[in-house]
Image (spheres, rainbow, N blue to C red):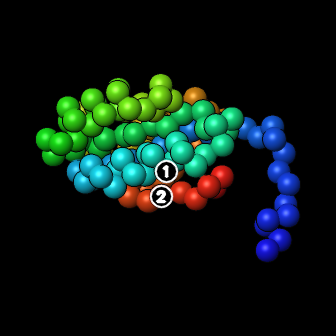
Amino acid sequence: MRCKTVTYDRYLPSASVIIIFTNEALSPLLRTVHSVLNRSPPQFLHELILVDDFSDRAVLQGKLEYYIKTRFPSKVRLMRLSERSGLIRTRLAGARAATGDVLVFLDSHCEVFDSW
């Protein structure tokens, strides 16, 4: 109950949210992205980076790219690695591409709560 009464500084650093995926089902991946975009305070969300660790599922190719370009704001970026690199190297690739003050790593099949 104490959390409800806590007041946070409105001038916090911006966040780059990095989501790593490999052959994830499209629906949970998109739900994760939608939850971050819809439930994050916009002044803190600098960007959302999706990093594909060399998926070979067809639905994650053209359909995902089209969905991102037509339905998400410019804050959402998709990176594709040219070979399977594993979780840690893929996170590091996302971290190198990030430009926010703080890095937040999320799984590709989770949802966030309001103002998380």
Amino acid under disc 2: Glu
Measuring 25% from the left and 54% from the top, which residue is drawn there? Answer: 25
| Count of picture labels | 2
Quadrant of the snapshot with the C terminus: bottom right
- Who's the residue at 85% across and 54% down the image? 7
Q: Closer to the camera, 115 or 94?
A: 115
* Residue at the image position 27 percent from the left and 49 percent from the top: 26
Percent position of residue 104, x then y? 56, 48
The residue to which callout 2 is attached is 111
Please tell me whether mark 2 sits on a helix, a strand or a loop: loop
Q: Is residue 51 above or below residue 26?
A: above
Q: Amino acid at mark 1?
A: Ser
> Of helix, strand and loop, which one carries label 1?
helix
In-front residue for pair 31/90: 31
> Is residue 108 toward the left or the right of residue 95 in the image?
left
Quarter holding residue 1: bottom right
